[in-house]
Amino acid sequence: MQQQASPARAAIDIGSNTVHIVVAHCTADNLQILADEVDMTRIGESVNATGEISQQKQDETMKVLRKYKALAEQHQAEEIVVVATEAIRKAKNKDDFLAAVERDTGLHVQIIDGDIEAVLTFYGAT
């Protein structure tokens, strides 16, 4: 009897330099990667320079997020989890950015705090 594949899930990370997506079939002890892409957006540059996410960086990131949502849907992902890290946490206009993402893509972004980010980075590296 052939085991049915677990549902596909997608995770998108909006970081200071990149936006990264992984789409996979996930089980407790296995990850079957269906897609793994990274785009360089460098949101952190504008946040470090002005304290805000520039319109250009917002537009670039929105384009990537639309592409990634389509990729997740192409793989029939049941869930798309989107997290944002330091650059978005620090941005003075983060609320406007998050509202624009939800309005333009339908994706809800969760901002993770620094301690959780550190733990996830550690697990990802090991």
Image (cartoon, rainbow, N blue to C red):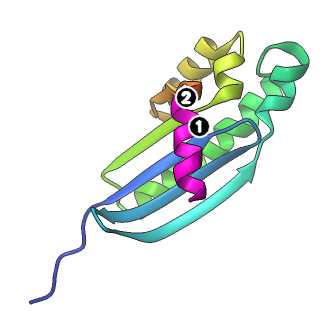
Residue depicted at 45% across the width and 56% down the height = 72
Pick the residue in front: 30 or 99. Answer: 30
Quadrant in the rendering for residue 114: top right
Q: Is residue 82 left or right of residue 114?
A: left
Pick the residue in front: 31 or 97. Answer: 31
The label shown at residue 118 is 1
Q: Is residue 40 above or below residue 117?
A: below
Considering every residue shown, the one lying at the far right of the view is 49
Magenta stretch: dominant secondary structure: helix
Q: Using the numbered discs, state the Cα–Cα distance from disc 1 to disc 2 in whole angstroms.
A: 5 Å
Q: Is residue 100 left or right of residue 45?
A: left
Pick the residue in front: 45 or 114. Answer: 114
How many numbered badges does the structure rendering display? 2
Quadrant in the rendering for residue 104: top right
Q: Position of residue 122 (x, y in %)?
A: 57, 48
Q: What kind of residue is marked 1?
A: Ala
Which residue was labeled with disc 2? 115
- From which residue to which does the magenta span run? 115-126
Magenta run includes residue 31:
no
Q: Position of residue 37 (x, y in %)?
A: 63, 60
Q: What kind of residue is marked 2?
A: Asp
